[in-house]
Amino acid sequence: MSPASGTESDPTRKQRREQAREQRRAVEAAAAAQAARRTRLIQLGGVIGAVVVIVAVILVATSGGGSSTPKVGHSTSDPEAKTVANLLKGIPQSGNVLGNPNAPVTLKYFGDLECPICKEFTLGAFPTLIEKYVRPGKLKVEYLSMETATHEPEVFKTQQVAAYAAGKQNLGWYFIELFYHEQGQEATGYVTESYLQDLAQQVPGLNLPNWSAARNDPALSEEVTKDAQIVSQQGFTGTPSFLVGKTGGTLTKLEAPNLEEASEFESAINKLLK
């Protein structure tokens, strides 16, 4: 016979209820303990974060404001300034013209100071042309402005006028070469007033007050505008672009696919020198 349900099953249900209550208490206690641990970890993390911030501030303060990423045109530019000084030393300059004004051959160089391809020419073929033709008085180079890489017209005019203003003291090519040697990454907005002032300070012998005053000369802005008119007449579409010919005669376009090598320029100049 089966046992009667009223005598043995009631205590069993009671025991199960007690066990269930104990299990719930255990689960709730474990959850509370876990929450407390999370709170302590969050608080500890906050303390550690605050300490890290304080240490970072101290490191920045003691390291001169984080100079591990030098600005364009500052102390790291000294070797570039020396390179430019050695390259141009002793070569006559007049405004935006480099070389003997009576040189038999003229090269007109249309450039944008922010153009990275112009920098390739400056660091590649140009030093050879300077040493082989400009320094001996065989070639003179005239720099003209052509807006390509600079995306803000006002910035373009400001930087080009700054170079022409240095040319008022016959030091324009120092400014141009320094700009290209210390050129920043395109379209990053690195050309600021501070950048231009830093370049000017590196130009040997430049009278800074006179340079600053010359930058306000409307004739220099007009010169940039006239350069643009020549660009339009010639149909140039990119920088650098070049015209070459006998001084005082008709100049023709010079195409140089490889701006890091001087051979194309040498060939054209040598033909004109014959």
Image: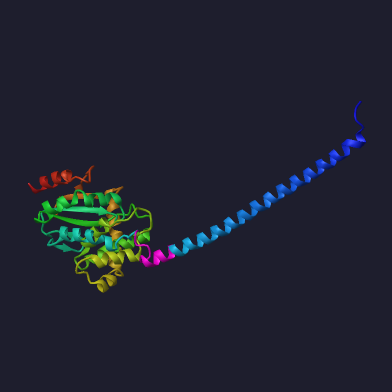
**Front residue (pair 247, 92):** 92
**Front residue (pair 68, 166):** 68
Q: Residue at x 80, y 45 (%)?
A: 18
Q: Is residue 262 left or right of residue 159?
A: left
Which percent across, then down, holds residue 236?
28, 48
Which percent across, then down, holds residue 219?
28, 67
Q: Residue at x 74, y 45 (%)?
A: 23
**Front residue (pair 148, 65):** 65
| Residue 67 inside the magenta-drawn segment | yes
Q: Residue at x 38, y 58 (%)?
A: 189
| Residue 62 inside the magenta-drawn segment | yes
269 w.r.t. 226: above or below: above
- Magenta segment boundaries in residue numbering: 56-68
Which percent across, then down, holds residue 254?
20, 46
Q: Residue at x 71, y 48 (%)?
A: 26
Coloration mode:
rainbow
Which percent across, then down, holds residue 194?
34, 66
The outermost residue toward the top is: 1
